[in-house]
Image (tube, rainbow, N blue to C red):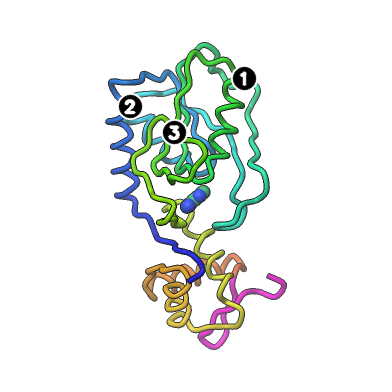
Amino acid sequence: MQFQARLVTWNEIVDWCLKLRSHIVGSYHPDAIIGLSRGGLVPARLLSDYLWIKDLFSVKTEHWGITASKDGEAKITADPSLPIRGKNVLIVDDITDTGSSMKLAVDTIKKFQPASLKTSTMLHIEHSTYVPDYFATSVSAMEWTWFIFPWNIYEDVLNLTGKILHAPMHVRDLSDALKENFGLDINQRYLGELLQNFAKSGKVVSSGGMWGMPQGK
Ligand code: ADE
């Protein structure tokens, strides 16, 4: 086993965001939501609906370059005209894992002088150095998992595939290898569909019923 990964369903996303809604409503009244792009965009959009907040902005953070590997220091890009001065602001992300993206987002967004600032994530891994004000589910460090969110399936499945596809493989063997290396349950039919779509974008190649990575990848 290299590390544990699992597919997250849309139902789980909705459940976690509804849980966040119930923690937040009655305790904090944000005027604006900032979703951390890209992982926090969908949860932020759902919370903007569930909490009746139309002022929804995004700030881009970058930390996890290739699936499950950190890309040096966390980086942030915020539009200097972000109109949140004097507002109660809720920052939303998908997960606090190391905590460094959220910490950096808080430090950066504070400079815009909001009246108050709170943070929320759907998932919180207990080793994170930053604990959000609100989270739906906590995960112990022992149970660390790479969560494949429904908006990141192509990127993550391709990256995990690249970690095992050193020589061309049949979809059946690839599905078995994803299970062995990452505990990932992904049925052959769905994996086959994904691979065909990856191939159309030149991300994988197929020949004689076998799948491989393109030359130089
Ligand atoms: N981004 C940072 N940590 C993550 C994890 N464990 N799963 C999915 N996305 C992440």
Q: CA distance from mark 2 to mark 1?
A: 24 Å
Tell me where residue 193 sits by quadrant: bottom left
- Mark number, residue 132: 3
Residue for point 59% across, 65% down: 201
Dot 1: what SS?
loop
| Residue 50, position as x, y percentages in the image | 31, 30
Q: Residues within 10 Å of mark 3 (few under 14, many from 20)?
A: many
Vertical position of residue 48 compared to residue 29: above or below? below
Vertical position of residue 64 compared to residue 79: above or below? below
Residue contact at pointers 3 and 1, CB within 8 angstroms: no
Q: Is residue 176 left or right of residue 36?
A: left
Q: Amino acid at mark 2?
A: Ile
Q: Which residue is mark 1?
A: 111
Is residue 39 highlighted in magenta?
no
Q: Which residue is mark 2?
A: 24
Magenta region, residue range: 204-217
Q: Amino acid at mark 1?
A: Lys
Residue for point 44% across, 55% down: 144
Q: CA distance from mark 2 to mark 3?
A: 12 Å
| Residue 24, position as x, y percentages in the image | 33, 27
- Mark number, residue 3: none
- Callout in the foreground (3, 1): 3
Vertical position of residue 57 compared to residue 1: above or below? above
